């Protein structure tokens, strides 16, 4: 069990549509922060390594069907199962860089027919609240032109447009919107400055609860 540090780590979440560059940026950021001596770990949701995550992986890669409400709850359960680990790492002073979180959960499920955003939020109420959401924006056309779009479930332009609209509805003034339409290095430099500020600001503030 890691011990409690004087200054807690920051909880920083990356959100955005598929292929907006989140994963690349998260990896580079974790490496850069550690190089600067800021203890940092990467996390991602869904975490496909757990029992629940393996079910989600089967669903996303179209190997199995899961009813829409049920899979929404599985995505949420996949976050809750990580909460004890997240809390103990944050308390031990480790900053967490998280690739997707509950906002993806809501934005993707609410893009399906017959889903209400408020219903979608409920299972994630009370999760650790991110100190900042870094929201990478990119036009759906640009995202579609980047790589293997269309391989997994949800990777269709029309669906992604609905997801984008939902992210816009979820966004609040604590989100930091960053235009992702630039080179990997330029975007990285911009994000590194932003995150160092967040880490400094968050260390002495208590961790809050999401949507409660
Ligand atoms: N996704 C992700 C959801 O539908 N609900 C969630 O709660 C989360 C965290 O899974 N298309 C979707 C968004 C992505 C897909 O994500 C897999 P990734 O980052 O490509 O592994």
Image (cartoon, rainbow, N blue to C red):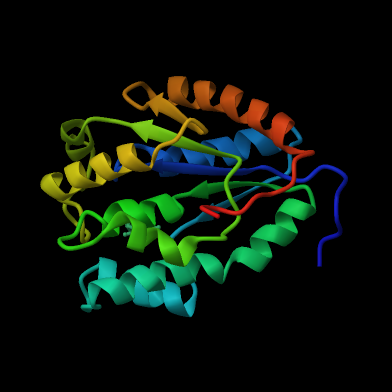
Please identify the quadrant where the C terminus is shown. Answer: bottom right
Q: Quadrant of residue 110?
A: bottom left
Q: Is residue 20 left or right of residue 45?
A: left
From what the image shows, is residue 8 above or below residue 25? Answer: below
Is any part of residue 46 visible from this angle? no
Rendered residue at 44%/50% (across/down): 100
Front-most of residues 153 and 207: 207
Front-most of residues 197 and 147: 197
Residue 176 pos. (x, y %): 48, 29
Please identify the quadrant where the N terminus is shown. Answer: bottom right
Q: Quadrant of residue 123?
A: bottom left
Rendered residue at 42%/26% (across/down): 178
Residue 152 pos. (x, y %): 22, 59
Residue furthest left in the image: 158
Q: Is residue 98 left or right of residue 169?
A: right
Is any part of residue 178 visible from this angle? yes
Rendered residue at 17%/63% (across/down): 114
Rendered residue at 73%/30% (across/down): 200
From what the image shows, is residue 177 above or below residue 100? Answer: above
Q: Quadrant of ligand 1?
A: bottom left
Count the numbered circles shown: 0
Q: Is residue 5 left or right of residue 31?
A: right
Residue 10 pos. (x, y %): 67, 42
Front-most of residues 136 and 165: 165
């Amino acid at each position: 069990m890691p011990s409690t540090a004087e200054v807690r780590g920051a909880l920083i979440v990356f959100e955005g549509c598929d292929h907006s560059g989140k994963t690349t940026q998260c990896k580079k950021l974790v490496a850069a922060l550690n190089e600067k001596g800021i203890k940092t770990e990467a996390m991602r949701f869904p975490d496909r390594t757990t029992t629940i995550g393996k079910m989600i992986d089967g669903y996303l890669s179209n190997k199995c069907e899961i009813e829409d409400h049920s899979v929404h709850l599985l995505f949420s359960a996949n976050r809750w199962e990580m909460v004890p680990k997240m809390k103990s790492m944050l308390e031990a002073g480790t900053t967490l860089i998280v690739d997707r979180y509950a906002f993806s959960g809501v934005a993707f499920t609410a893009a399906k027919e017959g889903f209400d955003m408020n219903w979608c939020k409920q299972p994630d109420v009370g999760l650790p609240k991110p100190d900042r959401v870094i929201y990478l924006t990119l036009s759906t056309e640009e995202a579609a032109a980047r790589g293997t779009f269309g391989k997994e479930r949800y990777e269709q332009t029309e669906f992604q447009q609905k997801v984008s609209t939902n992210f816009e509805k979820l966004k609040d003034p604590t989100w930091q919107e960053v235009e992702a339409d630039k080179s990997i290095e330029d975007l990285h430099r911009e994000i590194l400055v932003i995150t160092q500020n967040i880490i400094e600001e968050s260390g002495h503030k208590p961790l809050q609860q999401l949507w409660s």
